[in-house]
Image (cartoon, rainbow, N blue to C red):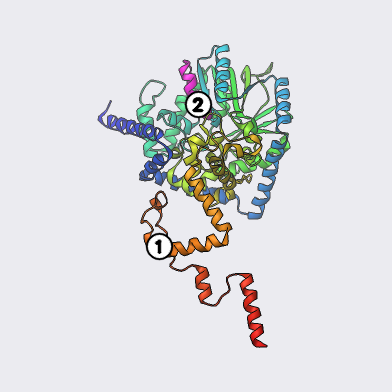
Amino acid sequence: MSENRIEMQQIVDQEEHDFADMKARHFKARAKMALENETLRASFRGASDFLMAKRKSVFPDDEELEALRDRGEAARQRSLQDLPELLEMLEANLTRNGVQVHWAETADDACKIIHGIMEAGNAKTLVKGKSMVSEEIELNHYLEKKGIECLESDMGEYLVQLGNEAPSHIVMPVIHKNKRQIARLMHTRATTPDGEPVPYSEDVDDLIGNARAILREKFRNADAGLSGVNMAIAETGTLLLVENEGNGRMSTTVPPIHIAVTGIEKVVRSLTDVPELLTLLPRSATGQLITTYVNMISGPRQPGELDGPQQVHLVLVDNGRSRMYNHPQLKPTLQCIRCGACMNHCPVYARVGGHAYGSTYPGPIGQVVTPQLGNAGGLAANGDMINACSLNGACGEACPVRIPLPDLIRELRAEAARPATATALGMPVPGTGSRRNLGESLIWTGWSTIYKVPFLYRTSTRLMGLGRSLMPGKLAPWTNTRSMPKPAARSLHQLARDAGVPSTAEEARYQNKQRQAEEK
């Protein structure tokens, strides 16, 4: 190994160590580490600006965009309204088409089902197209413990796998790295089919070409392929996948076994629901009018066909989605089409990046989805994450299917602080009440009482004005990022009275009568 390559290896090892160190910490510490990393901040700021500009360029007409968002929202809400019926219809039609359907209530159930399919087919290698649900259930770690080799074939996912990291964005997993970092990673961690180190190059075409040469052999020899699902059409029993690289099509066509995995919310009734969503998804995600490939899979290889898998399996994952579906305020969470537009427009995400969130789904949608998932630790583990939002509303304005993300974040904050017995319809989010603080509750109860009783309000404001010099200089956590507020020497009511302005309607009527009496 050359001296230059040894030096690069040390840099890549350090980056892997830094990621592991960040992952082991809590949200506030991860966010602080991200804010101190200038390279990371530059990568996210540049990527966010680029993606927002691309999205704007493909939606030049605001009225047309709003009309399209209305139709997209309606399509998703129609699907959710009839979700139980559509899932049964989907299963029946997929089964008729020769697809084997599996139901997984938890993340662990999903991993066991997929391992069982691999074991039954004597499959030892799995090549994966892009699938955020497989990240959500931590499938790679599960299968690797069972002795099965898992290889990511999406370029971004492949790179984060080489670096032993996790995706930092749901559409562009390696958005946190620049070209030099990627070139070092490929040169030190990847080998050509001949077993030689991949030549160092910062040219994008070279990087893609080197990865393509490595992955081509893996596709050819894989025992099974796995993909996600963007939409599942119930009436026809069709799995729809969109992609740009062709790796998804290779994963679903070349290996003898194709396993598709998706959340139960991705079902739509018919092909007529697809055009609006297929128009919104790529434009909102990457600023494309349409992706390079749109795949529709309705079954395994039929007699006389020259290619395609011998088996097709669909694993429908719940993992907390039924709870979201039955929560009256949080149900819109399931409208998400996983475009990532909310992240691209979020000022917090642009500064701290995806890894700071410590979850499969970062950014605004991650703040809403993650606490509700069955294997993510609920609000107890993710309470800091839901507070990493300024409620500026950019995510809600960017969402192509109008998910009210700021409202959902507020609802989760309320769930975290309210007693578990007060949750709606007995469907609490895991960890409800975990952020409830007795001292804070007493303070807000006292504040509410003071504002309800005029005498208490007048007395407390007068006392605060008199004791303003006794206020502390610091009051954590408020003064960690803000200056300490100081009560005014005289309240607004006192200033108004001194100026002759009546403070109440009753006093105004009294003064008016006095003036009328004087005039007479």
Name the spot of residue 291 as percent of width and height, x first: 59, 38
Callout 2: SS = loop
Pointer 1 or 2: first along the chain:
2
Q: Residue at x 72, y 39 (%)?
A: 78
Question: Which numbered circle lies on residue 493?
Answer: none
Question: Please, is residue 309 above or below residue 397 in the view?
Answer: above
Residue 151 visible within the image: yes
- Placement of the N terminus among the 4 image quadrants: top left
- Disc 1 residue crowd, few under 14, some 14–19, many 20+, Cα 10 Å: some
Q: What's the amino acid at mark 1?
A: Arg
Would you name the residue on which mark 2 appears? 138
Question: Which numbered circle lies on residue 468?
Answer: 1
Callout 1: SS = helix
Along the line of sight, the residue nearer the viewer: 224 or 314: 314
- Disc 2 residue crowd, few under 14, some 14–19, many 20+, Cα 10 Å: some
Q: Residue at x 51, y 68 (%)?
A: 492
The part of the chain drawn in magenta is 135-153
> In the image as oriented, which residue stretches furthest toward the left?
3
Q: What's the amino acid at mark 2?
A: Glu
